[in-house]
Amino acid sequence: MKIRGDVFWNWADPMLHHRTHDETLDDGTYIDVQVRLSRTGNTQMFIGIYSPRGFVVHEEAFDSRPGESMTRALAWGVGRARRIASEGVHYADLLAASK
C-alpha cells in the first residue's frame, strides 16, 4: 500500500482522463507515473516513487509538458522514475525503522 504525499494529493483530479504506468522494480521499489490532459489541453504528469514498505521516496508533478503527447510524456516519465529509483536510498524506511 502506498502512502501518498502532498505532491500527489495536490495534483490529483479524478475528473480528468489519465493514463497510468505502475511497476514494481526488482528491489521492491514501486513507481507510479500518470499523465493526463488538463482542462485547457496541456499534457500534465505525476511521478511517484515509493519504497517497498509504501513510503514516499520521491514525488513530483509537472503542470505542463509542452509539445508532448500523453504517450510521449508517459514514456519519458517512466524512464525518469526508473533513473531516480535506481539512485535512491529508502530514507523513509530507514527513518521508520529507527523509531
Image (tube, helix red, strand yellow):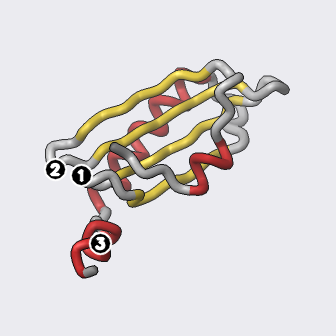
Which residue does the numbered mark 3 point to in the structure image?
96
User: In front: mark 1 or mark 3?
Assistant: 3
State how far apart marks 1 and 2 are (Cα).
8 Å
The residue carrying pointer 3 sits among few (fewer than 14), some (14 to 19) or many (20 or more) residues within 10 Å by Cα, namely few
Q: Quadrant of residue 84?
A: bottom left
User: In front: mark 1 or mark 2?
Assistant: 1
User: Which amino acid type corresponds to the residue marked 2 in the rendered image?
Assistant: Asp
In percent of the image, x 44 and y 58: which residue is there? Answer: 58
Q: Secondary structure at mark 3?
A: helix
User: Which amino acid type corresponds to the residue marked 3 in the rendered image?
Assistant: Ala
Q: Secondary structure at mark 2?
A: loop
Q: Secondary structure at mark 1?
A: loop
For residue 78, side relative to residue 6 (left or right): left
Whole-percent x, y for residue 97 in the image: 22, 73
In percent of the image, x 31 and y 76: which residue is there? Answer: 95
Which residue does the numbered mark 1 point to in the structure image?
52
Which residue does the numbered mark 2 point to in the structure image?
27
In percent of the image, x 26 and y 54: which residue is there? Answer: 53
Q: Nearer the viewer, residue 86 or 98?
A: 98
Q: Nearer the viewer, residue 53 or 67?
A: 53
